[in-house]
Amino acid sequence: MDAAVACRVLKVSRSGYYAWRDRPPSLRDQANELLVKQIERIHADARGTYGWPRVHAELVLGLGEPVNHKRVARLMREAGIQGVYRRRARRGPVAEATADDLVRRQFTVDGPDRLWLTDITEHPTGDGKLYCAAVMDAFSRRIIGWSMAHHVRTELVLDALGMAILRRRPEENTTILHSDHGTQYTSWAFGKRLRDAGLLPSMGTVGDCYDNSMMESSWGTLQLEVLDRNGWENRDELANAIFEWIECWYNPKRRHSSLGMLSPIGYETAHLPQPSPDGDH
């Protein structure tokens, strides 16, 4: 349909149509166009995982853009930009508890190295499953220790715990290490490593995901942002992706709603005393 016919059908003048067509975009439209470009960059930098809440946080906190969250949500919806959504993960074999539950679902702590959480996740690849054990500090949700292997023997969790101890060097008898009843965590070797490091063991209720819900939440994020987004040809490929996700994205950059939209490292930086330039504390 040409312009003359369209004008007759719509009962508008041809001069009015051409004036509308040739009118430059309004200032609001121009601003929205620039904002959408910023949103697209943020979404791409976030590996396509951010929905509007974290995109809005990055605009406001990261870029200093005073923009309303409803506007961000609307523009993302109109542009077809959306985050990824979570599903539940697996549970492994359990054994009789070797420690009391010292946490009782109270994961809020007022400082670092008061409460550590640990768990194992798994994912298939073309040459078999890859298992990942991790230790998280409940204060900042920072993953402070991790280990990956083709097996789920006790060495897997010992290596993750060893990394956490070396990185954080907790004071004796001040840090709780909370786990489920997985056979690796009830083993004699794991219990001895806890005692040697002066950590206080804690175990939740069998089969109750809420007793380690903070750790489960992080596994769900890993599942969502890494594991389910590709078909992994081999363990090495997946291990590299998990390493990069933890150390280059999750800990230093990924914004958490429970941390005031800061990253784990950003939260620790904002809430803990920092060493002075001359090395004094």
Image (cartoon, rainbow, N blue to C red):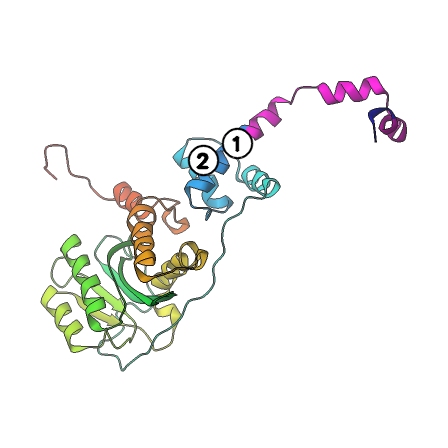
Q: Nearer the viewer, residue 129 or 84?
A: 129
Residue 72: percent from the left, percent from the top? 54, 38
Front position among marks 2 and 1: 1
Residue 235's x, y, as percent? 32, 62
**Which callout, 2 or 1, points at the residue further toward the start of the chain?**
1
Q: Is residue 22 above or below residue 281?
A: above
Q: In front here: 229 or 113? A: 229
Give the numbered dot on residue 59. Answer: 2
Q: Neighbour class for label 2 at 10 Å: few (<14), some, many (≥20)?
A: many
Vertical relation: 164 (above or below) 248: below
The disc placed on residue 104 is: none
Q: Secondary structure at mark 1?
A: helix
Of residues 159 and 260, which is closer to you in this image? 159
Q: Badge 1: how crowded within 10 Å, few (<14), some, or many (20+)?
A: some
Instruction: Give the residue at x 19% y 69%.
Output: 155
Please state the horizontal and vertical placement of residue 29, each as a whole percent of the image. 62, 27
Q: Amino acid at mark 1?
A: Leu
Please say if the residues under marks 2 and 1 sit with CB atoms less than 8 Å apart.
yes
Tell me where the magenta segment starts and ends, as one range: 5-33
Is residue 93 found left or right of 199 in the rendered image?
A: right
- Residue at disc 2, secondary structure: helix
Residue to which mark 1 is pinned: 35
Location of residue 7 (image quadrant): top right
Name the amino acid, label 2: Leu
Residue drawn 53% across the image and 40% down it: 69
In the image, is residue 27 part of the stretch drawn in magenta?
Answer: yes
